[in-house]
Structure formats: C-alpha cells, structure tokens
Image (cartoon, helix red, strand yellow):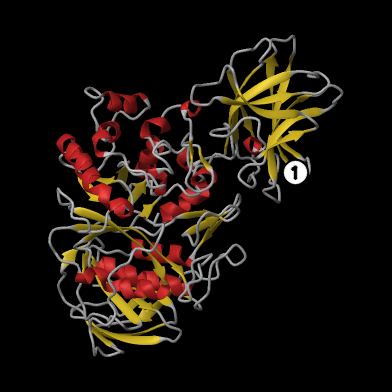
Amino acid sequence: MLKTLQLYFSVLGLLAGICTAQTTVSVSATASHAIPTSLCGYFFPALSGDGGLYAELLQNRAFQQVTPGTTAALNAWQAINGASLAVIADTKPVSSALPNALHVTIPAGRTGAVGFGNTGYFGIKLTQGSVYTASFFYRFPTASSFRGNINVGLQTTSGQVLASSSISVSGSQTTWTQVSARLRPSTTPASTANIFTVTVDGTAASGQTINFAMFSLFPPTFKNRPNGMRVDIANALQDLGPSFFRFPGGNNLEGGTIAQRWQWNATLGPLVDRPGRVGDWGYINTDGLGLLEYLTWCEDLNMEPIMAVWAGFALQGASVPQAQLGPYVQQAIDQIHFTIGDPATNENAARRASLGHPEPFKLKYVEIGNEDFFASTTYTYRWPAFVNALKAEFPDLHYIATSFPSNPVLSPAPTEYDNHLYASRSGMVQNGFFYDDVARDGTQYFEGEYASTTNDAGATLTFPTMQGTAAEAVFMMGFERNSDIVFAASFAPVLNDITSSQWHPNLISFDAGSVYLSTSYHAQKLFSRNRGDEYIPSTLPARNGTLFWTVVRKTSAIPNELIIKVVNTVATASAVTFSLPFHSVSSTALAQVLTGSATASNTPSTPQLVIPVNSTIATGQTFTYSAPPFSLSILTLTL
C-alpha cells in the first residue's frame, strides 16, 4: 500500500481554451480496441484478513509471535471462575512453528465450571442451527490420575449457554492430542458479544494443570471450504464480478524487516505448522490464509491470479545486497513452481499435489516486489536479478515492475508496470486523463491501487463519500478509454474491520456480525458488471469539465448492448445529448444510477443510504440524458 501519495502528471490546463460545457456527444460506429477481460478486479493487502475474509473466529488462537508471560500474550482470552492462565514457552511445544502454549491451572476450592474463554475478533456471530467446528490440542505437563471431561461451549457474555459438547480426557495424556467438537447454537443471540469457552468441573479437576495449543473455531465457510472464507464477505467480493486477484500484498509481502517478509512455504500445510508473522498493520498475521488458500480462492471466483514475489526490500528500508540475492531469487522460483509446476519433476509442485491440488493453477502475471519506487536505487539491481532468473525458468509469464515507469531506467525494460494513486477528490478527477497521454510503445499498465482518500481540504475520509466515488469513477473511465494499454485496475484497500481499523476509507467495512458496502463498492460493481467487450470512441469530455462519459459495446450479449457510462462530479444536474450512428437502437434503456449528496456515505448507521436505483429511460439514435448531482449512471441500450 502506498505510504505517501504518488505524484501523477497533472493534466489540468493541457487543453487551453476548451469550452466548459459540452452537451452533444457523437459516438463512433466502430470500436477502437478490445477491452481486456482482466480490467476489473481487486487487490488484497491482508488488511482485515485475519478476523475478516478469513473465517476463523478466535483471535490469538495459537499465541503466535507473542512474548510468554505478558498480559499482551493473553489478548482475547479471559479466565472463567478463577482459573489461572499464562502463556508459556512450552518445553515440549505442539510444533516447532508454535512454541507457545496456554498453561491453565484449576485452583482448589472452586466449584462449577472453571476454565477460560475467547472473545473472538471483537465479537463472535452465532446463528441458530449452524454448525461451528471447534478444535484444539491439549496435554498434561505432568501425569496425573485425573479422568473427566473438558466442556467446549458457546455462550453469551451474560452466561447463557448456546451450545456445548463434552470431551473425555485423562491425566495420563502427557503428549499433545488434538480434539474437536461440533457446536450447534440452540438460538440466535441478539448480540455478537459471545464467547467460546473451554471449562472443566472445578471440584473434580481441583489442582490440575493442563496445557493447550492451536485453538480453532470455524463457522460455515464460503463453498464449505475447510480453513475457508467468511460467507458474507466472500459473497460481497464475488458480487463485484472480479476478473483478477492481486496477492499477497502490498506491505504484507514486504514485511517490516527482511525476517518478517511473507514467505510462501511458511503458509502451507496444517495450521499447527504455520508460525505466523508480526504483521505490518498492528496485529499478528496468522498466515491461516496461505498461498494455497489464495490460489484456491482465485479458482472459486474464477479470477486471474496476479501473484507477487518478494524482491529483496522490506518496509523499514532494508534492501538485500546484490551479492546476497541468490537465496531469495530461488525462493521466488520455488513459489512459482509450487503454483504451476509439474509434480512429476519438481518437489515444490509435488508438495502442491500432496496438499490436494495435483493440477497446476493458472498463472499469467507475476509482480516483482511492491512499491519499489521507495527503493528505486536498489531496484536497479534487484529487478534484473529476479526477472532474468524467472524468465529463464518461466519464459511464458509476464513480469510486472513496481517502480515508477522509466524512473529509474530498468534493464531488461519492463513490459508491464504497476502504478498506484491515492488522492483527493479533485486530484482523482485531474488524473482522469493520465493514460490518454501515455506513449503507446508496447508497455502495459496495471493500476494496482487507487482511491479518493481525502476531501479537497485534506481531511482523510472515514468512509467513501459520493463526491469521492464520482471522482474515482472519472479515473476509472480513463482505464476503460485507455484499455489498449491498461490491462487491470483495482481499488484499495478492500476490507476494514470498523472495530479495529488500520486504514480508511475502504471498499467494504464490517464488524463481527455485518458487512457494510460503500458508495465506492457500488461504483466498482457497476463498472465491473458493465465493462463491455470493446471500447467505442466518442467525443471526448472536457478535461477540466464536470461531466464525463465513456461508451463500450458488449458483443457477447445477444442482441449486442451499447453501454454508456456518465459521471457528474458537481452538485447540480447536467444534461448531455448522445448521437448514435447505429440503425437499430432500442427506444428505451436500462438506467442504473448511483447518486447522493457530496458527503453521503454508507456507514454502519446508514448502510444503504446510497445504493444503485434502476429505471427505464427513453432513448433512440439521438437522446438527451440528465445526470443527477454527484452521480454515476450506467445506460444500457440494445443494438
């Protein structure tokens, strides 16, 4: 994610003396170029992955990357009825990846249920009749004669038991054993203030000490994938109609330090073998969402992967010296072999097959690093080290550079660049014609991150506003108009847990129980679902104007569809007349309109303040459309 605003060339004033109002648009009869199917997708920087897209309900489930003996190590855990809790470095850890354990002592004199609970990621949503799958490892550090039950449950914070299951245990069990339970709530609680509990009978277990490790609690997941995605968030992302998925970041790829970088091979296999990492956004990354989960997610949504490899630069400024790049280049080669290699000839591909996916995943694009304009002096040696080795091994793939185009000059010359822009409302509109002025020299561009993040006074937005969304739509029209050189674009960031926000504004906000779709989400969906197959030239809008449009044709539809997008960036309605050269034009069109006041936002208190509204309008070979204030309109005619 961009840490400071990338400066694009200003396009204001390039056409001096242009008229301020253009009301008649002549549309060409023929297309100028095809629109790539990859144009609309999304970027996942791992912000709100844990506790968000990743469906795991327990926070701090495995005590990864915490300091034993500290209060912070017990984040999200609490004692029940006086149990003594401490996170320890276990002398016999559950795995080499997870050295820590929860050390629980049942004090003498306690009666009833004694144990501990987890409050989840700021709550746990529970639904009557749904099955929640719980599991954990346990062992007795010292053998004892205890025989009894561990009770696993779900309850409200007021103590109402919603589901429970008993597991028989023995004090002779001094090696790690994994147990599981299926929990089905008897009712749907009114609140998400619920707790996952693990208890024993205080009298029967008096004085006993038990160690626990690697807890998990999963609700039903998207497409019932094990270790899968949260259903409501996944559905919202699927509804966007994305054609690509850029992963694993972003800053998540780079890591704060070289040691904290994302390492593909540490994100595979059983959860108990994943160490997790200190994340870049104030929380621990469990890496429960690993490389295999990302690639499977691409298959589930039929998305093209745009997969990044770590390229020798970390967020805090460290670059790997040129002479020491070899092992990191090999790690990137191995990552790609895991993704597309032949299990019969490559050990990394064989590992993929052993994890249940013998067929190679599809892969066309590999991104070399992330935002390497922050370390351009070292990218001049890092880029060739990676791209030359990768091209030699995988000559059919496309490799995307992440420095500024032509600054520095890279060798070999990149054929694709990833550009990023976070700007004010006016800055976004001003850059709506940025790609019109880019040379057609064979280079292709990926607008990998963009958003209107501030108002024109410089105040950061908490949620996208309709004014900012309209500005983003102008910028998006530039991608469509210039899709002969722009092959992909993605708003960023995608997800935000409103109870623990690291960045805003975002496309989708959520809490433990609900999902909130922003004005920008609806604009992204309107563009993606109405992208068309070919771009139709028309009279260009004024670069310094307030009303903008593009025209595309959907030849895959029968009959063909002409899709006109219109954006109004000001507080008054604006009329535009379209003159169409086609002999057969429908007399009516479907109008999908997203409009609201300048500061209108979809928030938890007003989640549907601004949503698209459909209507039918009169059209023909010539027709006039009045675009509402601060609006995006999609007009679909048949030909």
Q: Is residue 298 above or below residue 417?
A: above
Q: Quarter of the image containing the C terminus?
A: bottom left
Residue at 14% across, 72% down: 30
Residue 480 shows in this picture: yes
Q: Quarter of the image containing the N terminus?
A: bottom left
Q: For mark 1, what is the residue?
A: 157
Q: Is residue 185 left or right of residue 543?
A: right
Disc 1 secondary structure class: loop
Q: Is residue 538 above or below residue 448?
A: below
Q: Where is residue 542? Give x, y as percent.
A: 27, 83
Q: Is residue 228 left or right of residue 313?
A: right
Q: Is residue 505 above or below residue 218?
A: below
Residue at 38% across, 35% down: 263
Between 299 and 62, the one lying in front of the other is 62
Residue at 59% across, 39% down: 59
Q: Quadrant of residue 575?
A: bottom left
Q: Is residue 337 left or right of residue 493?
A: left
Residue 337 shows in this picture: no
Q: Where is residue 379? Give x, y as percent.
A: 26, 48
Between 516 and 442, the one lying in front of the other is 442
Amino acid type indicated by mark 1:
Thr
Q: Residue furthest right?
A: 109
Residue at 72% across, 19% down: 209
Q: Quadrant of residue 261?
A: top left
Q: Where is residue 581? Give x, y as percent.
A: 18, 80
